[in-house]
Image (tube, rainbow, N blue to C red):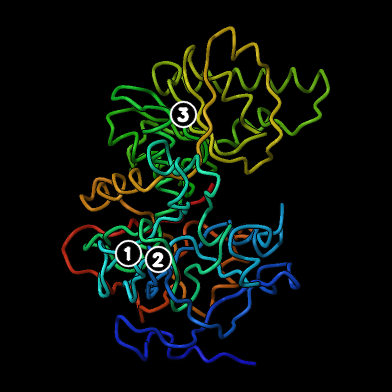
Amino acid sequence: MAVDIKDIAKVSTEPGELPKTMPAWVIREDRFGEPKDAIQLEEVEVPEPGAFEVVVRVMAAGVNFNNVWAALGEPVSVFRYGDHPEYGHHIGGSDASGVVWKVGEGVTRWKPGDEVVVHCNQASYEDPEVHGLDPLAAPSQRIWAYETTWGSFAQFCKVQAQQLLPKPKHLSWEDAASYGLTYFTAYRMLHERAKLQAGQKVLIWGAAGGLGVFATQLVAQAGGESVGVVSSDDKGELIKQLGAKGYINRSDFKGMMRKGGETGDTEKARFKESRRFSKEVESVLGGPPDVVFEHVGQATFPTSVLTVKPFGKVVICGATSGYQLDFDVRYLWMRQKEILGSHFANAWEATLANQLIEESKIRPVLWKTLPFDDVAEAHQLLRDNKHLGKIAILVGATEEGQGRTAEGPGAIRAEVGA
């Protein structure tokens, strides 16, 4: 049955009261496949907030690759996790800006009408790790709208109250929906895990990508120096504008990428290219990096371990080229280097990072804004690698630029990508 979304920007109830149903882009287990087929528009019931939960009217949503995996059912089905068994559907969208519409029992910090952005970490308030260690260590930890449902590709989304942050007043709805997942991840990697210090040197892989554009700004803001690896000179110029000392075009070092299963001779040639790359990094930075910002994995990890200085740190949050890592461990133990894993951010780190956005010390970087009816196509663009950067989706907002209530620089509009 066709779902009418021409009035998606209108809500029939006042804040504090929810309508019965809403349009949402939904994935179901029986139609896993390409995003354009798996993500379909449905009319679903609007969820009521439970204790310490909030329902937000979505004004804009951010597109991330996690919902491509959700559509494909790879590497595992999202329906094995979180609240999916209870509801039987997945509504993705792990970035959102919007208006608090209804609060659940026990919520005191937020009220209907508040303008917010959402971070995507969830955990049970009953887990002791949440109250003294780190919510990321809690066994209940989940990424909202990937390992749970009720994400932002709908008229309303449901979140834990601790996920909410004040929307920066100088940002439009689409700007505010474009940064959370990647920016907060980069913040934790550099500040909490790597303990970035002023004066340190940082190598950033994929520096013009969703993570890299924030890592580049964070290093500069902290008083460090970075060199970014990019896929084109245009992207290199972009990251220099964001604060990088220089850049390296990865096409000049194709031979250093590890593919797995190299023979003795091919590995020797690859290692030689990695050494040449390391020298180029040192040339740009004036010395080896104290920190390597990793998220590529198999293809780059051996070079990361080789390149970072003795006693330096390689911090990694993902593995887009493969998660089976094979590297010469002698360069790790004999030079006493560290490998640090990192996963998203907790509410405190997201709050500190959001303050830098509010102060315009860090700016979102946005490529394109699309209407609500293009959610499935937006994910197909990511799946086919035809995007050039972060995509935002208008939901309650009727056009770009809405939502700004103060002066200040908005998002940087740029064609970016890995």
Q: How crowded is mark 2: few (under 14 residues within 10 Å), some or many (20 or more)?
A: few
User: What residue is shown at x 49% (from left), y 56% (from top)?
Assistant: 389
- On the image, the x and y values in percent for residue 375 come to 54, 73
Q: Nearer the viewer, residue 13 or 312?
A: 13
Looking at the image, residue 196 lies above or below residue 346:
above
Q: Where is mark 3, residue-wise?
A: 203
- Give the residue type that dot 2 points to: Ala
- On the image, the x and y values in percent for residue 303 come to 60, 24
Residue placed farthest to the top in the image?
334
Q: Where is mark 2, residue-wise?
A: 51
Q: SS at mark 3?
A: strand
Q: Where is mark 1, residue-wise?
A: 106
Cβ–Cβ under 8 Å for marks 3 and 2: no
- On the image, the x and y values in percent for residue 9 come to 38, 84
Left or right of residue 43, residue 271 in this image: right
User: What residue is shown at x 34% (from left), y 75% (from top)?
Assistant: 102
Looking at the image, residue 113 lies above or below residue 96:
below
Q: Residues within 10 Å of mark 3 (few under 14, many from 20)?
A: many
- On the image, the x and y values in percent for residue 18 come to 39, 84
User: What residue is shown at x 69% (from left), y 30% (from top)?
Assistant: 325
Depth-wise, is mark 3 or mark 2 nearer the camera? 2
Looking at the image, residue 363 lies above or below residue 116:
above
Q: SS at mark 1?
A: loop
Q: SS at mark 2?
A: loop
Left or right of residue 267, residue 342 in this image: left
- Give the residue type that dot 3 points to: Leu
